[in-house]
């Protein structure tokens, strides 16, 4: 019997933990439970698939410049520890999953110590948005990129990045949860307007967006002159803060908890006001027209001078057209938000344009007969085999 494949995986935040767990399940289905062994860094979902994490993933799951600076000594130590442990384990491959500021530093150290080790990057850094030179800089230490977004393959080719394959976004595996069954979403003109309020999943987003979102909800209800049933799905670690903030809102939304309740709200919604992020792709796949808003600190605002993407809205980038309006910084205020959102609350050309664009997503994000996790596993195994053949 051949030895099991020994893989070292490193994820740095919740979304990476979900992707890593899906990849692990697909690999076990392909190789058999005894055919693969996992080590590295992850959280609950990856641990549930058999990974014993080197340390709690929460040590490195930080976002924003100020949060990173505050935890910098710990982050640097964890980078050194992770790379050293990976080298000591002598794995058959290293898989780095998202969180490039952490995982790519680990990969560079491991490549220096083990030049022949296959290294796969699951989730491309946003080289299409800013710092495009990162694509070419990855070539010395990344053998293959597994991309979640279809346009990223051409981006890496154009920028001289590593080999890249579109493996699909995990959201495409959940269309049954996102899309309404017959009768679940009533016509937009029939009865109360069902509005989603999605202020983000990070404390910084909540602190900056709750006030303008609350003001927008009040103005919209007054402008429409009809009942508005607003739903706000709250992430668990910010639920108390969200509940306190909503107390000051003139129009109170219904706060729901848990993913099942969130997706049920998506299936019934007519429109949404959302923070920029993956949620815009969730809404687009669910067929919910939206307005996107975002605010960052004054320091982070300076990044706009180096951002090269045509939109900050992920759904716009996948569609290839700026159909979803995005209001940023000073434009993220109740008056402007209400003016953009109101036309989406009836059968209007603005609403029809977004709905028509969303209908193209299935074709754009198609992955054939494989799920994204299965496709990622297949491409990763082929990368390992190809590098072994060249060794």
Image: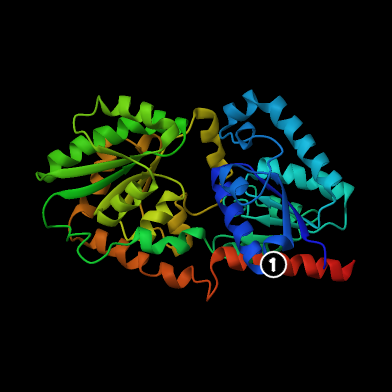
Which residue is depicted at the point 77% across and 47% down? 107
Which quadrant: the C terminus?
A: bottom right
Direction from residue 278 to residue 112 in the image, left or right: right
Image quadrant where residue 179 sits = bottom left
- Mark 1 lies on residue: 31
- Give SS at disc 1: helix
Report whether residue 77 is seen: yes
Kindly identify the residue that appears in the image at 55 percent across and 43 percent down.
14
Q: Position of residue 199 (x, y in %)?
A: 37, 38
The one nearer the camera, 357 or 203, is 203
Asked whether residue 144 is in view, the answer is no
**For the residue carrying disc 1, how many other residues have a C-alpha within 10 Å: few (<14), some (14-19), or many (20+)?**
few
- Of residue 267 and residue 218, the one placed in the foreground of this image is 267
Q: Is residue 191 above or below residue 43?
A: below
Where residue 303 appears, as percent x and y from the top left, is 56, 38
Is residue 270 rendered to the left or right of residue 1? left
Residue found 75% across the figure and 36% down from its top: 79
Picture quadrant of residue 100? top right
- Horizontal relation, residue 262 to residue 389: left or right: left
The location of residue 304, given as percent across then percent down, is: 53, 41
């Amino acid at each position: 019997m051949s030895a099991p494949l020994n893989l070292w995986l490193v994820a740095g935040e919740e979304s990476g933990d979900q992707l890593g767990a899906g990849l692990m399940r697909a690999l076990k289905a392909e190789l058999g439970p005894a055919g693969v062994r996992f080590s590295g860094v992850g959280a609950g979902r990856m641990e549930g698939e058999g990974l014993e994490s080197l340390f709690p993933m929460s040590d490195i799951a930080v976002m924003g410049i100020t949060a990173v600076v505050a935890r910098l000594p710990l982050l640097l130590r964890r980078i050194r520890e992770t790379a050293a442990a990976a080298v000591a384990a002598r794995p058959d491959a290293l898989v780095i999953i998202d969180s490039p500021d952490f995982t790519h530093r680990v990969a560079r150290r491991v490549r220096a110590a083990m030049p022949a080790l296959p290294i796969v990057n699951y989730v491309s850094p946003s080289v299409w948005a800013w710092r495009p030179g990162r694509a070419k800089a990855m070539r010395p230490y990344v053998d293959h990129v597994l991309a979640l977004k279809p346009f990223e393959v051409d981006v890496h080719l154009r920028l001289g990045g590593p080999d890249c394959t579109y493996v699909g976004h995990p959201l495409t595996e959940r269309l049954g949860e996102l899309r309404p069954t017959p009768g679940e979403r009533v016509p937009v003109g029939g009865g109360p307007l069902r509005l989603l309020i999605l202020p983000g999943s990070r404390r910084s987003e909540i602190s900056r967006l709750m006030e303008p979102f609350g003001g927008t909800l009040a103005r919209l209800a007054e402008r429409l002159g009809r009942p508005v049933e607003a739903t706000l799905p709250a992430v668990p670690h910010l639920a108390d803060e969200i509940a306190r903030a909503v107390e000051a809102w003139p129009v109170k939304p219904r706060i729901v908890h848990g993913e099942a309740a969130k997706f049920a709200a998506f299936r019934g919604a007519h429109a949404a006001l959302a923070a920029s992020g993956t949620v815009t792709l969730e809404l687009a796949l669910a067929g919910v027209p939206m307005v996107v808003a975002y605010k960052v600190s004054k320091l982070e605002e300076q990044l706009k001078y180096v951002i090269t993407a045509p939109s900050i809205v992920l759904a716009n980038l996948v569609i290839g057209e700026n159909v979803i309006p995005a209001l940023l910084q000073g434009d993220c205020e109740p008056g402007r938000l209400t003016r953009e959102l109101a036309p989406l609350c009836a059968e209007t050309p603005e609403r029809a344009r977004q709905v028509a664009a969303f209908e193209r997503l299935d074709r754009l994000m198609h992955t054939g007969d494989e799920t994204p996790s299965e496709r990622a596993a297949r491409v990763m195994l082929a990368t390992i085999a190809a590098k072994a053949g060249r060794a």
